[in-house]
Image: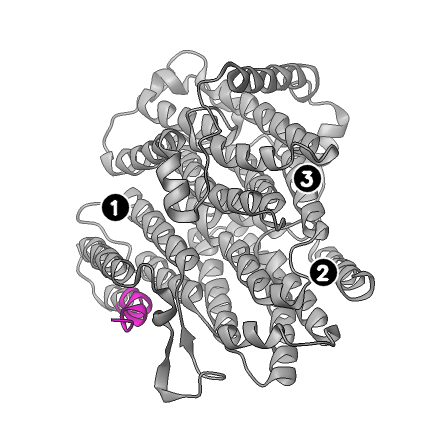
Amino acid sequence: MNQLAVVLVFLPVIVSIVIYLSKWRHMNIVAIASQLALTIVAVVYFTHFYGDFESTHIVLGGWDSRIGISLANDELSMSFIFLSLFSWWMVLIYTFRFGHTEHSFLFFLIFLQGVFLGLLQSNDLFNVFVFLELATIIVTILIAYNKKGESFRSALYYLIVNVPAMLVFLTGIILVYFTFGSINIVALTEQFQDVDDTIILRFSYVLMMAGISVKAALFPVFTWLPKAHGVAQSAISALLSGLIVKAGVYLFFRMNFLYEGAGFAYSDFFFMVGVLTAISGVMFALSQKELKQILAFHTISQVGIIMMGVSSADSDMFYGGILHTFNHALFKSLLFLGAGVIIQVYRTKKVGEIRGVFKTMPVVSIFMIVGMLSITGAPFFNGFISKSIIKYGLAEQGWRYWALYVINIGTATSFIKMSQIFFGPKTLSYPLKNMAQNVAMMALAFGCVLLGNFYIPFSEGFFGIRVEEFDLTSFDVLLDYGITVAIGLVFYFTVIARDLKPVRMIRESRISFENANLVFLIYIVALTTYFVFLS
């Protein structure tokens, strides 16, 4: 039965090759059928091993487990597997056109799913590196798929920023293998607990975390994300922002689990990085004038909030960060898909040039509003519960609590700015000719509302978090959200709407590839100073 883990990797890879080689115009139906088969395989695998994931460990090719290609699963990886399956379902439905298949697009899209599922299940460090490199190449192609100058430039920037990060990550793996003679994560977890001299371990941790930070778009190495997500097709932006960027977050979890036995995982350093990531993301989002750029910078901001949670050894905050990872995948995918429809109809990305969306496309508007309420942490929507878990964990920590509060005000302000697109008279005609797009958005909106109201069984069933204390209907909760929105309104009309010079300076700031690498080196030095010399 544990061979099904291999099927989860190779089924989408094989199907993608078949789609690429075939010229049949209905191959998108084959893609949907393969996605259904993949989902069934994942469900069967999960139900068989639920409660006994230790027996999922498999080594391919008969090699020694210390150096061979190894796969394994647990509750965390299975949660991400189901999240990835759901995300790919939404993208496949959103891009579905009956009788019309873009074979090369589907090839890269479905091949990427196999690679991502392999990354989630990898139990050896080198295989993690290989899957990350494959994902980097495929994502680069998907960013450039529009074949426009801006797309090519952004794709190239994404590639050349991520390549040094992956080389640094590989160097960390080499240090581990040189010291312990193994790349098997399970075996290394046990070995790390018995190490007295941790200097090499600390260097390897620094190098791997530096590479992971680029993948997760943490401050200050996030410069590739708005460039890539802002120009890619909206369906790809939804996948990149909702899920692919979480590869870095997922590896942050994994590496901290691995290094926890050595005694220096989870630290104030990454909490500070999370705060700076969230604040910088909000600042840049507030200054933007294009829909997708606002959403792209808010991906950075929300990843910062996730890091504020998962950088803590406190179990509730940690699982709150994990839960926010899943919630963000839902509402950010919804927002990107909705923005894609709006941009397609209005033929512009600029917020100032889009008006009357609610009267033009009321259904899409409702879905977008659900996403906006979710990301701002409104009660009865999924973003509320995960943000509340983190906020309650910070309640007695002074400035940390208020930092999150300020970030939430900035988020509310940003989406107050975006909400102006809904007002005004109907200026265009929007026939409901593509129901597939609405189906995908409806499923995501339903997920945001469902998790926002039935969060107790989900939180306790998957993560073991007891969340009965979060009352969605209490006056204090509604008042707190109302105050946040009210302050956001004041800030928007007094500062952001006036487009003051500091706002313009933030929007017009650019960072070159050379400076991005310099910042990356400074970040590595900061990591080294903290984890090697100060800890």
Tell me the CA gap for discs 2 and 3: 19 Å
Tell me the CA gap for discs 2 and 1: 39 Å
Disc 1 residue type (three-letter): Phe
Q: Residues within 10 Å of mark 2 (few under 14, many from 20)?
A: some
Residue at (44, 83) in percent of width and height: 65
Image quadrant where residue 389 sits: top right
> Residue 262 in magenta?
no
* Mark carried by residue 136: none
Q: Going from the N terminus, do you reach mark 2 or mark 1 first?
A: 1
Depth order, front residue of 125/352? 125
Query: Up-down: is 89 above or below 131?
Result: above
Q: Going from the N terminus, do you reach mark 2 or mark 3 first?
A: 3
Is residue 286 left or right of 462 when viewed as pictured? Answer: right
Q: Residue under circle 1?
A: 96
Q: Residue under circle 3?
A: 280
The image position of residue 409, as x and y in percent, is 62, 25
Q: Give the range drawn in magenta.
A: 1-14
* Mark carried by residue 517: 2
